[in-house]
Image: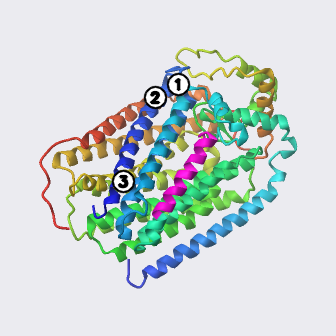
Amino acid sequence: MKYESQGIAKMYFIAAIGLFLGQILFGVVMGMQYVVGDFLFPEIPFNVARMVHTNLLIVWLLFGFMGSAYYLVPEEAERELFAPWLAKLMFWIFLVAGALTILGYLLVPYAKLAELTMNDLLPTMGREFLEQPTITKIGIVIVALAFLFNIGMTILTGRKTVINLVLLTGLAGLAVFFLFSFYNPDNIVLDKYFWWFVVHLWVEGVWELIMASMLAYVLIKVTGVDREVIEKWLYVIIAMALISGLLGTGHHFFWIGTPDYWQWIGSIFSALEPIPFFMMTLFAFNVVNKRRLDHPNKPAVLWALGTAVMAFLGAGVWGFLHTLAPVNFYTHGTQITAAHGHMAFYGAYVMVVLTMISYAMPIMRGKKAANQTAQVIEMWSFWLMTVSMVFITLFLTGAGILQVYLQRYAESPEPFMVVQDRIALFYWLREAAGLVFLSGLFLYIYSFFAKGPEVEAVEG
Amino acid sequence: MRETFTKGMARNIYYGGAVFFFLVLIGLTVDTVKSLPQTDNRENLTEQVAAGKRLWEINNCIGCHTLLGEGAYFAPELGNVYTRFGESTEAIKAFIKYRPVDGIEGRRSMPQFNLSDEELEELAQFLKYVDGVTIARDWPPNIQG
């Protein structure tokens, strides 16, 4: 660790992993509710479990992004963080606000939470992924602004590398587009249209900038490949991400009462969205093949290659599978969407944060790489989580194809709940895969505590 | 990548492409917002409907159902529930009103939200209004949603 203030990332990463575990536990609960409908009912209804599952995901990824930024920005800028105290303060504010929000979901009925937090003054609650009480949303904005100020000042008064500037652009975009979450018109079409300015422009827009810059940083560190080469790749990848992704928003405007031209624009541009992810795969393998050093941290390299491949499969391939309007006509809002969502989030954003944690955590704990036993365990957890996520995706895809056929494609379509019963086998298999994922996550957490022989220090 | 393709060129494609397509997105957004009155059923957006949308939100209905295909996939699509229930707001209200408090053994069940008659009417009117939005190709493909 070159700069002391990089160490602030550690608390962010620990919180991220803790919340990740919470997310997966609730995922397993929901998977069970899919097949045993009254599981934990009425104490934890499905909608509450889902809200906890998705909101924990968002919050822990934000912890992961912020921790990653606090780690890599000082090193890239070649100076200490502008205000380490502010980073620590914001950590506790964000953690307490996040915990209170999740407890609110679990302990009181959602309508009661809306009343307690005075949702009526500025109603923003009750829209998918943006379920947080308005006061929490305001808290998120404050934390985001303080964070941006902190890393922004660090970058502007230090060395300005491409990685830092791209990361800053992505994070600024994240904050700006979140502001659309405060716009909640009564008109359902307008509401849905601008809701996507948060959701799509995050995950298929500015988050790709964040992901690509984090990946580029780790690849420079673990391969020793020339920065010029990596920066060129980075520019091309993010150029393609925005060229395809901005108008790719149109694939969400097929069936919400918006004009017909979105069917063409959305189909064409979102069909291009796999390109930046495919380039990320080429980039990662290319750079690792041309490596100038063999970094002792093997899991970090594995995660870096893994995130590139899985992001391409989940976001690119599974996204393209149902993005063309004539196909999406049948698949919209089915288990196909759920299949895509799972592998895309895991492949792109979960894995890139784990890449960063894998690389930075040993260094923050005072060594270049974890001991051999810990590395082996971490790589086992990589395979358990990644392979089980592939199966979760495949089982949901199977469920989705049957659902589309039985409910929408067959000559005599059947009602939703009848179809759900018929495809229960796939949900059971998904739940089994989910339990394997959970065991992989336990193993991952255990890897931080495993003792074993130290790896030899390799010059780099 | 080849040396003839420089980092500067890559950077220019990024900045140029991002700015250009962002401006196109803004332009199309303006056009879309202008054309919405033809499709979004705003003539039926009454205060009752607006109150119903608020109820839809504060009871987190989207946490189980889809509405125009967006939301969770645990419970039926509700963008066309008014049509599916025989164009009867009474049927919608009755369904919500008589959900068992403790659920149904072994099966998925909608929670009992204890809504007043007035609130039930608002929620039903909201669902009726959403059903009136003109969707491309009359999505969903059939009445089952």
The residue wearing badge 2 is A29
Q: What x and y, as percent, mark residue A160?
A: 43, 74
Question: In this figure, which residue is indicated by the disc labeled 1?
Answer: A44
Task: Tell me the magenta residue range.
Answer: A128-151
The chain that hosts pointer 2 is A
Q: Estimate the x, y position of residue A152 in percent, counting from the top left.
A: 48, 65
Residue type of the residue flagged with mark 1:
Ile
**A437, above or below A280, in the image:** above
Q: Secondary structure at mark 2?
A: helix
Q: Is residue A386 visible?
A: yes
Check residue A65 for magenta coloring.
Answer: no
Q: Height in image: B59 above or below B133?
A: above
Q: Determine which residue is flagged by label 3.
A: A8
Q: Give the image quarter of residue A418.
A: top right
Q: Are marks 2 and 1 in contact (CB under 8 Å)?
A: yes
Q: Earlier in the sequence, mark 3 or mark 1?
A: 3
Instruction: Mark 3 or mark 2: name the one nearer the start of the chain.
Output: 3
Q: Position of residue A288 (x, y in %)?
A: 28, 65
Q: Is residue A188 above or below residue A413?
A: below
Residue found at x 69% / y 52%: A193
Q: Amino acid at mark 2?
A: Val
Residues at marks 2 and 1, CA–CA distance in whole angstroms = 9 Å
Closer to the camera in the image, B51 or A324: B51
Asked if the stretch drawn in magenta spans residue A142, the answer is: yes
Q: Are marks 3 and 1 on the same chain?
A: yes
Residue A309, how many percent across, how many down? 38, 56
